[in-house]
Amino acid sequence: MLKRMLAVVAGSLLAASGFAANPELRSDHPQTYTVVRGDTLWDISARFLKSPWLWPEIWQANSQIENPHLIYPGDQISLVYIDGQPRLVRGNGGNRPDVVRLSPRVRNVGGDRAIQPIPLEHIKAFLEQTRVYSDEAIKHLPYVVENEESRLVSAPGQLVYVRGLDARPGDAVDVVRPTVVYRELPARFPWTKSVPRKFDRKPYDGVRQVTFASLWLEGFNNLHRRHSSEILGHEVQQVSRARVLKSGDPATLELLDSNFEVMKGDLVVAADTHPYDASYSPHAPDAVPANMRVLGVSGAERYTGSYRLVALSRGARDGVANGEVYALYQPSRKQRDKVKFANEDLRTVFPNKAAKVVIPEEFLGHAMVFRTFEKVSYALVMDGIRPIQLNDIALAPQAL
């Protein structure tokens, strides 16, 4: 579902952030750089800075232009010094390196588009077809109760019947399918690799099926967690776009185009015509939420790396915003000192602090948030240097 992507960017409409530091220039930085088609702000700032997300600290914006942060192919980015401080400007700053000459002008950009915060053509399908709903919201979504002619599955051009849908004939809706339930990862939870849990849809009717086994397992987990694990959200994937032909209970829908065949139990939501924000710019966060963890990774069950996606356990409720850059770390862990204390060493029969060594947190790479929901956010790994897996932690970004 999640595909390999190109690198993205940094830059910000915000002023200095809480984690801002004095940006350090690369030793091999150019004095000028001409933007070419396919560049991203991250690519450009990485040519000048060791920490690309600190672009806002040295970007000299033109307040006389409506959106001074837009950069286009063909623009020349120059490094100049103003009051002794390095600044990046659009243009060469005139003949004096310490003065930036900026003035409003009408611009003909032809067919060129401004440099995007994310190369949307590479992730557009994911952005449009995946979303997260709260536990309460998903319980009340309309659902497909039957397919045309009692088929097992339905394809474009065929009809499906939906219960609980409040819509008028002609309205566009999306048929979606739950994929993963994201749950809170307690800081000391011992079985972190068991979450997130795959969604059970046999069939899904908004009511959790309770069995003796499920009650026993839930009680056992709660005993060790000491509290119920909070559901942060239900990830769903778009299956089909549809049009309402007839209201009622059930309502009649015609399938227009599909990514997959529609099945009984699939859910129905209003069509999202603006599924993502394309105007933000990456930056360091003002604050890092406590116990922010990797909930899911793309392309594999456990590990991922550069230019892949991760789901993080914090969202808008915790102040996470699109464009924020976080550093990902493997959590610290305790291990037996097998050099000095072998497994058969009698001194380790009873608890012995000397036989344990705490391995510190290990830096894995940076990830940039590109889509935020209430309690969950999606981020793109920018510069992973080690494999990233479930339960890794997100902290303030650091210089490479």
Image: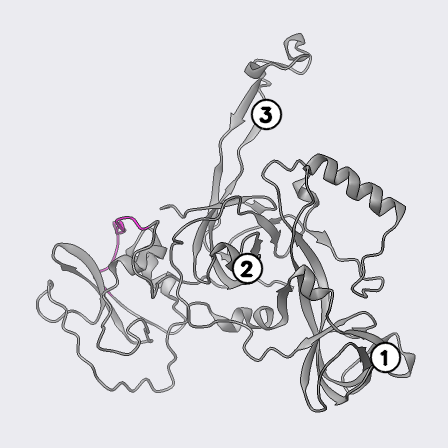
Q: Quadrant of residue 156?
A: bottom right
Q: Which residue is mark 2?
A: 378
Upstream in the sequence, badge 2 or badge 1?
Answer: 1
Q: CA distance from mark 2 to mark 1?
A: 33 Å
Residue at image point 61% right, 50% down: 295
User: Which numbered tag is attached to residue 147?
Assistant: 1
Q: Is residue 52 left or right of residue 305?
A: left
Q: Secondary structure at mark 1?
A: strand
Q: Is residue 130 left or right of residue 154?
A: left
Q: Is residue 211 left or right of residue 378?
A: right
Q: Which residues are magenta?
A: 20-32
Give residue 147's position: percent from left, percent from top.
Answer: 85, 79
Q: Residue furthest left?
A: 96
Above-or-below relation of 264 to 387: below
Q: Secondary structure at mark 3?
A: strand
Q: Is residue 331 left or right of residue 143?
A: left
Residue type of the residue flagged with mark 1: Asn
Q: CA distance from mark 3 to mark 1?
A: 55 Å
Q: Quadrant of residue 233?
A: bottom right
User: Which numbered tag is attached to residue 335?
Assistant: 3
Upstream in the sequence, badge 3 or badge 2?
Answer: 3
Q: Main secondary structure of the magenta part?
A: loop
User: Which numbered tag is attached to residue 338?
Assistant: none
Residue type of the residue flagged with mark 3: Gln
Q: Residue furthest top?
A: 346
Give residue 2's position: percent from left, percent from top.
Answer: 61, 62
Give residue 331's position: percent from left, percent from top.
Answer: 54, 37
